[in-house]
């Protein structure tokens, strides 16, 4: 355990097997606590959804635990809650995941249940109808947040007709168009061992875990699905800002860009730029716009890790009267990155911060299982856990400058605020 | 390997000569959590200066004479660590997560900005603007707006009724002198607890603390006494929030006179039986069977002067609010009149015990739990959690429900996007 936790990476601590049916299994033995976490991943998630199916994976996630060919929703809930375990599902843009967590002694029983859900969900029509309604309400609830409104507006413009243009919950229209039959068809076609990655971390004996996974999933035979990734559109930024008038107390000001996919050679540089700009109390935007100018409480950057071109953005929430000023300041910070390479010292701080936070993101068994499984699903392999810090350490100010020049020249501006605040922006 | 499997080492507590209380546990992890708890939350504020506790929390991060603005953040994050703070009604806590190589300088720097912050006028001008933005952002969140209203009803006439962030008017009254006065009064070792969890030796920790802690000042160093809660007038109110996309219903019971941790755990068990999982009574009926709520949650929040047991329902359809309330009332009535089955109780106990295990996996989580229990004066009881929680029997829960959760709540609030009719 000491080795595992004190080294920067999980190198040498994980086992990888591919079962005869094509399923990939990753196991990390971490005896530090009496907890075992497992994540079952499926490629490629939302990326295979056509616009009329947006939200399909989310609805599968909401109903996968609501019945199998052998158990009712009640029986499944009883099995999980009697163990005091946790079991959850999530549709992410690039994958679908089922996560479980239990004390070590309960893990085998819980994993058997998870495998049953994975292989043979029944998607009862009444449960699908209920979750459909609740999803539509969830979409409405998201619209309360100025950040979500600005982000939605941005991604619709960045990725027209592509799954990245909407929340994984889909749109009201697409969700209401789905049926239980659609969910069954989807499961039948895409859930298969060749595209399943099982990642387990905790107080386990790797060989015994492997035997158990073999027993639960080894005889699962479904032909490998094949699919094509969606075409990523290449729109140009509009001449005028995107704007949405809402009677909010704050204006949300966001600049967005089309950043690279995780497989791109520019991915590490953009990750570091995002950290430099918006991560933590010492980040550039925090210091300049919050500490020095008092323009915002929440000011940050985002650049999620994605299989296809990922959105890159900076944003802040500010008083209506400061909307124009804040937009100018945000834009000036990006311009500064384009003008010349950053001072070496600033890059070093950002690097330490990124690497430190990366290491801190691997403290719990669930975090470790998630990270390794995700890398496997993305096709990077669990070794990327070692590779990523190495790539970050090799970056120079020139790398960041070139990446900024390439990706951050033309922003999409997204604004949410009162009519009066927006009227000031031309 | 065997020594690594040793699940926990003992928790040590000690009061130093400076008056600082220390809670410490050696855990062989890569991250060290350092967490200062100061008994100077919003309830300790003079009424005119509501928001000063939270404002001081912000100002501490602006540094000291030795650490100018930004230097502290740079020091912590430049070593790959992170830092933040939180203000509640009872306390403020400041934490740093760092590595076993850098904990000394992190602790020294954190103590420096805590004990000797530079509460300069122009810095405060800038930070006040930041807090006003924080306030505006909160006002755009219907859940925050509703919660603030609930506190006003539940704690009318008590310091807890005031918003932790303050108001635009009260923030305008706060000057550097007000901040300095509040700091002098409460930010001394005798009014603080330091929680440290990580792979650092006790002796080394003591050596650093001997250097960084000022000697206690005798004058005006009494901690804030929090007065008991007043009797609450029952209230039912409807709040119109046009930007809300969905209605919320709150039912709240202020809980007073709780002198031990176990009563709170019993109230947690009741909350778990009602909404802790898909099988839980209210979740099952209102979400799974009827679809009348998008979500529903019960929880108990204990504070020094008294707690609050609250239900929150995110309504699927505001027109059903009365039907939802009828179900809530039935289920509460059932808890007072019928015994929970042993099976249902065992399930709730197991869920809470495992939630505790899952929630204390990292040094940060552990420090947070120890700090909270210590602030409540219940650290020793807290360590008996497993044994005590499993002792509850169905009769105990019925008694607790009868005592604290009558089927008509004390405060009801319905937040709705609809115009008042």
Image (cartoon, coloured by chain):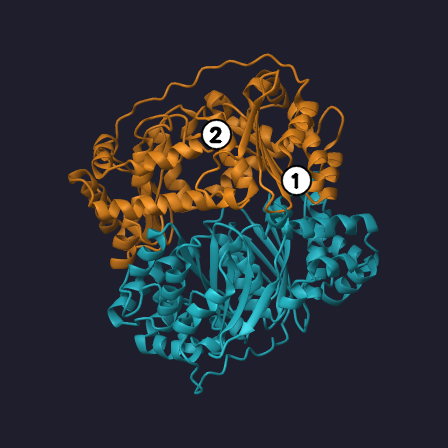
Chain colours: A orange, B cyan
Is there a contact, CB below 8 Å, between mark 2 and mark 1? no
Q: Residue at x 68, y 26 (%)?
A: A211
- B173 vs A384, nearest the viewer: A384
Question: Which quarter shows the N terminus of chain B?
Answer: top right
Instruction: Say whether residue A414 is visible.
Output: no
Q: Is residue A103 above or below residue B389?
A: above
Q: Residue at x 34, y 67 (%)?
A: B59
Extreme-bottom residue of the structure: B219
For label 1, the residue is: B291
Q: Nearer the viewer, residue A168 or B357?
A: B357
Q: Quadrant of the C terminus of chain B?
A: bottom right
Residue B188: x %, y % from top left: 43, 77
Q: Which residue is mark 2?
A: A382
In the image, residue B265 lies at what x, y percent?
69, 61
In the rendered image, the vertical position of residue B103 relative to residue A70, given as above or below:
below
Q: Chain of mark 1?
A: B
Give the distance between the C-alpha atoms of the residues marked 2 and 1, in whole angstroms.
Answer: 41 Å
Which mark is in front, 2 or 1?
2
Residue in front for this viewpoint, A65 or A101: A101
Q: Which residue does the image show at 76% across and 64% down from the upper left?
A: B400
SS type, badge 2:
loop
Residue A192 against residue A257 in the figure, above or below: above
Element at badge 1?
Answer: loop
Mark 1 crowd level (few <14, some 14–19, many ≥20, 10 Å Cα): many
Q: Are marks 2 and 1 on the same chain?
A: no
The spot of residue A149 in percent (x, y) is 40, 41
- Is residue B245 among the parts visible in the rendering? yes
Left or right of residue B68: residue B249: right
Q: Quadrant of residue B169?
A: bottom left
């Amino acid at each position: 355990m000491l080795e595992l936790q004190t080294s920067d990476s999980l190198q040498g601590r994980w086992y990888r097997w591919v079962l005869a049916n094509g399923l990939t299994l990753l196991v990390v033995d971490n005896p530090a606590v009496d907890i075992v976490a497992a994540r079952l991943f499926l490629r490629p998630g939302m990326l295979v959804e056509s616009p009329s199916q947006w939200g399909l994976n989310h609805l599968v996630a909401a109903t996968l635990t609501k019945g199998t060919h052998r158990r009712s929703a009640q029986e499944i809930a009883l099995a999980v809650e009697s163990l005091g375990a946790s079991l959850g599902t999530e549709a992410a843009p690039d994958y679908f995941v089922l996560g479980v967590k239990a004390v070590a002694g309960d893990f085998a029983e819980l994993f058997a249940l998870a495998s049953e859900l994975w292989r043979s969900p029944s998607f009862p029509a009444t449960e699908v109808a209920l979750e459909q309604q609740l999803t539509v309400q969830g979409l409405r609830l998201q619209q309360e947040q100025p950040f979500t409104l600005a982000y939605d507006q941005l991604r619709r413009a960045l990725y027209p007709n592509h799954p990245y243009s909407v929340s994984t919950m889909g749109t009201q229209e697409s969700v209401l168009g789905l049926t239980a039959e659609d969910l069954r068809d989807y499961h039948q076609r895409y859930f298969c061992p060749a595209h399943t990655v099982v990642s387990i971390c905790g107080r386990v004996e790797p060989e015994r875990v492997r035997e158990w996974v073999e027993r639960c999933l080894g005889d699962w035979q479904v032909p490998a699905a094949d699919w094509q990734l969606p075409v990523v559109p290449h729109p140009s930024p509009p001449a005028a800002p995107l704007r949405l008038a809402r009677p909010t107390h704050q204006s949300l000001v966001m600049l967005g860009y089309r950043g690279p996919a995780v497989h791109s050679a520019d991915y590490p540089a953009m990750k570091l730029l995002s950290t430099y700009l918006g991560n933590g109390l010492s980040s550039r935007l925090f210091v300049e716009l919050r500490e020095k100018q008092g323009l915002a409480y929440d000011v940050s950057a985002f650049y999620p890790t994605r299989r296809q071109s990922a959105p890159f953005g900076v944003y802040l929430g500010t008083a209506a009267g400061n909307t124009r000023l804040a937009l100018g300041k945000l834009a000036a910070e990006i311009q500064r990155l384009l003008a010349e390479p950053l001072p070496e010292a600033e890059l070093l701080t950002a690097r330490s911060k990124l690497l430190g936070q990366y290491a801190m993101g691997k403290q719990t068994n669930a975090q470790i299982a998630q990270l390794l499984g995700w890398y496997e699903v993305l096709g990077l392999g669990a070794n990327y856990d070692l590779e990523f810090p190495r790539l970050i350490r090799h970056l120079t100010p020139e790398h960041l400058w070139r990446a900024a020049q390439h990706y951050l020249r033309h922003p999409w501006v997204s604004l949410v605020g009162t009519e009066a605040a927006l009227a000031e922006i031309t | 390997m065997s020594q690594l499997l040793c699940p926990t080492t003992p928790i040590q507590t000690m009061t130093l000569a400076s008056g600082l209380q220390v809670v410490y546990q050696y855990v062989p992890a890569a991250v060290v959590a350092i967490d200062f708890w100061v008994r100077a939350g919003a309830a300790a504020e003079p009424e005119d200066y509501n928001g000063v506790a939270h404002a001081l929390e912000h100002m501490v991060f602006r540094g000291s004479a030795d650490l100018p603005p930004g230097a502290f953040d740079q020091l912590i994050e430049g070593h790959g660590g992170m830092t933040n703070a939180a203000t509640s009604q009872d306390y403020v806590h400041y934490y740093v997560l760092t590595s076993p190589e850098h904990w000394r300088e992190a602790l020294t720097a954190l103590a420096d900005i805590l004990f000797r912050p530079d509460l300069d006028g122009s810095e405060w001008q800038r930070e006040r603007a930041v807090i006003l933005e924080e306030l505006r952002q909160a006002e755009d969140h219907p859940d925050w707006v509703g919660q603030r209203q609930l506190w006003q009803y539940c704690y009318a006439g008590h310091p807890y009724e005031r918003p932790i962030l303050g108001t635009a008017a009260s923030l305008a009254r706060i000057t550097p002198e007000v901040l300095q006065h509040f700091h002098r009064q409460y930010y001394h070792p005798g009014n603080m607890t330091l929680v440290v969890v990580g792979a650092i030796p006790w002796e080394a920790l003591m050596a650093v603390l001997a250097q960084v802690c000022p000697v206690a000042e005798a004058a005006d160093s009494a901690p804030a006494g929090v007065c008991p809660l007043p009797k609450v007038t029952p209230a039912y109110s409807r709040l119109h929030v046009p930007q809300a996309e969905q209605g919320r219903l709150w039912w709240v019971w202020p809980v007073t006179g709780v002198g031990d941790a176990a009563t709170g755990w019993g109230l947690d068990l009741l909350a778990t039986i009602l909404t802790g999982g898909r099988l839980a009574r209210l979740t099952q009926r209102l979400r799974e069977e009827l679809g009348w709520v998008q979500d529903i949650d019960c929880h108990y929040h204990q504070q020094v002067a008294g707690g609050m047991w609250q239900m929150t329902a995110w309504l699927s359809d505001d027109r059903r609010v009365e039907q939802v309330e009828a179900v809530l009332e039935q289920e509460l009535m059932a808890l007072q009149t019928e015994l929970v089955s042993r099976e249902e109780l065992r399930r709730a106990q197991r869920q809470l015990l495992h939630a505790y295990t899952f929630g204390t996996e990292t040094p940060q989580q552990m420090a947070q739990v120890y700090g909270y229990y210590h602030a409540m004066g219940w650290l020793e009881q807290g360590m008996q959690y497993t044994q005590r929680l499993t002792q509850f029997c169905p009769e105990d829960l019925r008694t607790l429900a009868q005592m604290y959760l009558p089927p008509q709540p004390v405060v009801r609030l319905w937040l709705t996007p609809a115009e008042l009719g």
